[in-house]
Amino acid sequence: MKLQQLLSYTRKAVDEYQMIEEGDHIAVGISGGKDSLTLLYALHGLNRFYPKRFELSAVTVDLGYEKCDFSPVSQLCNELNVPYHIVKTDISRLLFEERKESNPCSLCAKMRKGALNQEVKSMGCNKVAYAHHKDDIIETMLLSMLFEGRFYSFSPRTYLDRMDLTVIRPMMFVDETDVIGFQHKYDLPVVKSRCPIDGYTKRQYAKDLVRQLNRDHHGARQRMFTAILNGKIKGWPERTVQARQT
C-alpha cells in the first residue's frame, strides 16, 4: 500500500466519523508495532493538507521489558518533526513477577491505557489516536459474541468523560494486509514485542478464526465488517456521509 492510499482510507474515517476538529492536539499512541507506526505516517501526512488544522504528538508507554529499544521510533519522529514522549512503567514486572498473571492481557491493556491517557492529558492533548485497523474491529466483534454474548466492537470515536479525552481510530478502514505492505514498502522501524505470551492470546484465536471463515466463505470477512458498520452498536457515532463501498 502506498502512502496516498493510506491517506485516502484515513481521511474517509476522519470525515465520516467526525474525528478531527479545528485546533485539536492529537497524541498518537505508539507501541512500536507496525500498526501504530503506520498511523503516525497517516496522521502526519493528513496534517499537511487537511482543512481543519491540528497539532500532532506521539507517546509510547514503555512496559519495562528488557532489550526494548525505542530509539528507532524516536529517530522517525524527529524526521517527521513530531514531538515524542516515552512513559516509563514497570507494568511487565507487576504482571509477570509480582502477580504472576496467567491471563494478563486485559489488565495489561487497562494499565497501559491508563498510563497513556494520563501522559496525553499532561501534554495538553484533547484527543488520542489508537491504531486499530479493520481486522481489529472484526476480531473484537467476534470475541465479544463468543465470550460475552453481545454484538459489540470498539467505536470509531469515543469520549472518555472522566478524562475529558476523546479516543479516535483513524485506521478503521485499513486492512491489516495493507498495513503489512506499508511496513515493508516504507521500511518502518518496528520494535519487536517482548511480551512472553505474544501470539498465544484469544485475539490471535479470533484472527485465525476470521481467516478460516473467509477461506471457507469468500467475502465473509468484509460482510462481518459491513454488519458492524450497519449494526447501530451502542456508543457508535452516526456516519455523516452516505455509506459507500468499504
Image (cartoon, grey):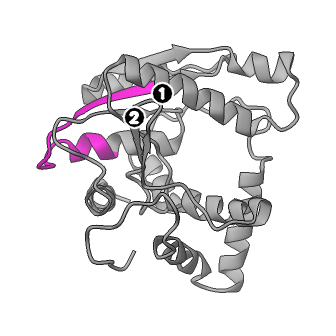
Q: Residue at x 47, y 45 (%)?
A: 131
Looking at the image, is mark 1 or mark 2 nearer the viewer?
2
Residue 65 image offset from top left, x and y in percent: 69, 19
Q: Is residue 47 left or right of residue 96?
A: left
- The residue singled out by tag 2 in the image is 165
Q: Quadrant of the C terminus?
A: bottom left
**Residue placed most toward the observer, 36 or 154:** 154
- The residue singled out by tag 1 in the image is 117
**How much space separates mark 1 and mark 2, taking CA atoms?**
8 Å
Callout 1 crowding tier (Cα within 10 Å): few <14, some 14–19, many ≥20: many
Q: Secondary structure at mark 2?
A: strand
Q: Residue at x 41, y 24 (%)?
A: 120
Residue 217 image offset from top left, x and y in percent: 67, 86
Q: Residue at x 73, y 21 (%)?
A: 92
Residue 187 visible, this angle: no
Looking at the image, residue 33 lies above or below residue 133: above
Residue 201 visible, this angle: yes
Q: Secondary structure at mark 1?
A: helix
Tag 1: residue type?
Asn
Which quadrant would residue 159 be assigned to in this image? top left
Looking at the image, residue 219 lies above or below residue 179: below
Q: Which residues are magenta?
A: 42-59
Which quadrant would residue 104 be assigned to in this image? top right
* N-term-proximal mark, 1 vs 2: 1
